[in-house]
Image (spheres, rainbow, N blue to C red):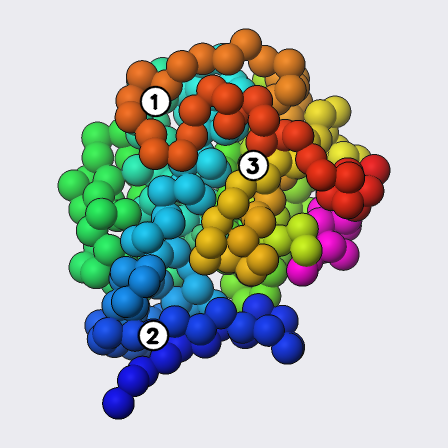
């Protein structure tokens, strides 16, 4: 019998994958967790029925959420990743030679353990206990309340704005992010699909603009995520992503390059309209 898994991206639309094998299902204090092996996307992490990452295309999301902000900052040293339990964002962040420390605060220890076991390609920095990495299992919202003038770059690699991630999309959280950044720091957050999450994108953009002198949205094509077009929002205290000198990565990448760094901020008119 054929097994299929459907993520309902809207009430009336879903992405359906044929499954080879269910590798893990469990329930943590925060969410339902599953890892399935699929025919076309390889192994996938699913939280509360929502696709989080797949072996097939994870490099796009993780390179774009980490390298774009890290290459906007001329000399990032102290980095914080909030969420990102699969380890993909920290795997990319530790590659930057200027980066001395990467703290990761993930609320759900079970996501980290499951990713270490079933997604070793993504969680490699967690598995090997990378020397730059400090992992804390805890609430990113609480962590931000306590941090001040500490980070050059903060990467908010969160799940959807429901459940434990809801508070990561609020003005109160952005205020704490601002406080936690150094005077020339910047942050990035994954901000969903410009087709299906327009009200969310509009609201967040306004909230971030109220605090940060520079707010920019950028795009990447990610087949796993709703509509395939995904957006990220940067709030920056000093460096404008559209004005910075381009630096060539000193490591190999599969999606990111200096042309992408420049062009990902070029927006279609309907997206410009959302954030104007
Ligand atoms: N790439 C993914 C996407 O866009 O679908 C997100 C990846 S990552 C798995 C998201 C992580 O954020 C989850 O592991 C979840 O447990 C974590 N998370 C949600 N709320 C959090 C919070 N308040 N503090 C820290 N981590 C949180």
How crowded is the residue under tag 2: few (<14 C-alpha within 10 Å), some, or many (20+)? some
- Residue appearing at x 21%, y 60% in the figure: 118
Q: In this view, does 244 lie to the left or right of 276?
A: left
Secondary-structure class at tag 3: strand
* Picture coordinates of residue 262, whole percent (x, y): 57, 22
Determine the secondary structure under disc 1. loop
> Badge 3 is on which residue?
188
User: Residue 96 — which label?
Assistant: 1
Circles 1 and 2: CB distance less than 8 Å? no
Query: Which residue sits furthest bottom?
Result: 1
- Whichever of callouts 1 and 2 sits on the residue coming sooner in the sequence is 2
Which one is in front in this view, the residue at disc 1 or the one at disc 2? 2
Which of marks 2 and 3 precedes in the sequence? Answer: 2
Magenta residues (range)? 196-208
| Residue 120 position in % (x across, y down) | 20, 51
- Residue at x 24% of width, y 74% of height: 20
In the visual, does 41 lie left or right of 261? left
Judging by the rendered image, the residue that carries numbered circle 2 is 18
> Residue 24, image x and y in percent?
25, 73
Q: In which quarter of the image is residue 11?
A: bottom right
Question: As drawn, which residue projects farthest toward the top?
Answer: 245
Q: Quadrant of the N terminus?
A: bottom left
The CA distance from mark 3 to mark 1 is: 17 Å
**Where residue 275 sits in the image (x, y, percent)?**
78, 41
Question: Taking 87 as reference, is 131 left or right?
Answer: left
Q: Is mark 2 on a helix, strand or loop?
A: strand
């Amino acid at each position: 019998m054929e097994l299929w898994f459907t993520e309902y991206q809207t009430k009336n639309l879903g992405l359906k994958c044929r499954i080879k094998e269910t590798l893990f299902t469990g329930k943590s204090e925060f969410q339902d967790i599953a890892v399935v092996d699929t025919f076309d996307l390889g192994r996938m992490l699913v939280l509360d029925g929502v696709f989080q990452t797949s072996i097939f295309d994870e490099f796009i999301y993780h390179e774009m959420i980490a390298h774009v902000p890290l290459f906007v900052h001329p000399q990032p040293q102290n980095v914080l990743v909030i969420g990102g339990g699969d380890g993909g964002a920290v795997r990319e962040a530790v590659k930057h030679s200027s980066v001395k420390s990467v703290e990761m605060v993930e609320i759900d220890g079970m996501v980290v353990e499951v990713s270490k076991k079933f997604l070793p390609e993504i969680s490699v920095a967690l598995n090997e206990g990378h020397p730059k990495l400090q992992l804390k299992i805890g609430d990113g919202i609480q962590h931000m309340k306590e941090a001040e003038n500490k980070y050059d770059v903060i990467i908010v690699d969160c799940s959807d704005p429901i459940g434990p991630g809801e508070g990561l999309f609020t003005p109160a959280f952005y205020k704490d992010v601002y406080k936690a950044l150094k005077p020339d720091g910047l942050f990035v957050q994954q901000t969903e699909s410009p087709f299906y999450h327009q009200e969310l994108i509009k609201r967040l953009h306004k909230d971030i603009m109220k605090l940060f002198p520079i707010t920019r949205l950028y795009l990447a094509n990610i087949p796993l995520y709703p509509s395939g077009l995904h957006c990220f929002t940067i709030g920056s205290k000093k460096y404008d992503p559209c004005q910075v000198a381009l630096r060539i990565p000193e490591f190999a990448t599969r999606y990111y390059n200096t042309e992408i760094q420049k062009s990902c901020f070029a927006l279609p008119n309907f997206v410009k309209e959302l954030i104007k």
